[in-house]
Image (cartoon, rainbow, N blue to C red):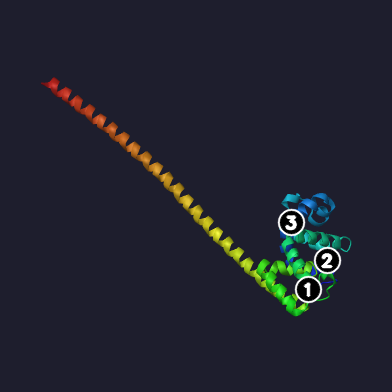
Amino acid sequence: MYKNATYKEKYFALQAWMPTIIEDVKKDLKNEHLKKDLFFIKKYVGAKNVNKITTDELVHAYQSAIADEENGEALAEFITSRWLLKNSELYDFFDTTLSKINPNFSLLEEIDLTHSMNIIKEAKTLFGACPTYLFSVLNSVVFPKEIFQALAEQAEVEKQIHANKVEQLSEKLTTEKMKKNFEQEIARMTDKYEKKLSGLQKKYHMDMNQFKKEIANLQRKIQEYEHKSQ
């Protein structure tokens, strides 16, 4: 299905997956491409510090650039090479597995349905449906069309499950952060009023001591007056 596809054609098919691909290789893109290609930044991103460019901005920039007839194919190939390096274990798996079917597997036109299903099953167990699907498209694995369609659907489900887990984790962290903030605020208010109460207690004791001294002084004067009166 993708055996003779260009990189531009592959990325057109993987438009919905660009955020996933770019997220995996964004450090490489920033260090190996953007810092050396100021014209690209000016044209597709605008004047901005490379380190401050977001993943969404990178996705938009590279999608636009890949669609450009002038340099799109080279950029798509560069992104693919970096993504494949990040997923070398997948390459090793397919290299070993496909070599069992044909030592020169690059000559394969299409893998039969049984072998395809077995390969996909094992790859999903080891790496997950999403990486397996992306690798199969980007590296032109010659699965039958129906296998690609089924794998794409499984990858979408897996991506949604992952997104839901991330959202739930984010909500949990937000809740925990709010709880922690409330606890810190309660502790701060408690400390404030304990100090205030402590201050009031000290003032009370000081006032009481002063009052006792004044009473004692007054009693002494009364006794002196009574003594003089006798």
Tell me if 70 is positioned left or right of 55 in this view.
right
Q: Which image quarter: residue 139? A: bottom right
Tell me if 71 is positioned left or right of 25 in this view.
right
Mark 1, secondary structure of its residue: helix
- Measured as percent of width and height from the top left, residue 97 is found at 75, 69
Using the image as rendered, state which of residue 64 and residue 228 is in the foreground: 64
Mark 2, secondary structure of its residue: helix
- Measured as percent of width and height from the top left, residue 107 is found at 85, 72
Disc nearest the viewer among 3 and 1: 1
Q: Does the image show residue 87?
A: no
The residue furthest left is 230
Q: Residue at left 75%, top 67%?
A: 96
Q: Mark 3 vs mark 2: which is more N-terminal?
A: 2
Alpha carbons under labels 3 and 2: distance apart: 18 Å
Q: Amino acid at mark 1?
A: Ile
Disc nearest the viewer among 2 and 1: 1
Q: Residue at left 86%, top 63%?
A: 73
Residue behind mark 3: 26
Q: Which image quarter: residue 26? A: bottom right
Using the image as rendered, state which of residue 188 and residue 164 is in the foreground: 164
Note whether 138 is above or below 219 in the view shown.
below
Note whether 25 is above or below 206 in the view shown.
below
Alpha carbons under labels 3 and 1: distance apart: 35 Å
Residue behind mark 1: 101
Disc sitting over residue 21 in the figure: none
Mark 3, secondary structure of its residue: helix
Q: Which image quarter: residue 120? A: bottom right
Q: Amino acid at mark 2?
A: Tyr
Crowd around label 1: few <14 · some 14–19 · many ≥20 (10 Å): few
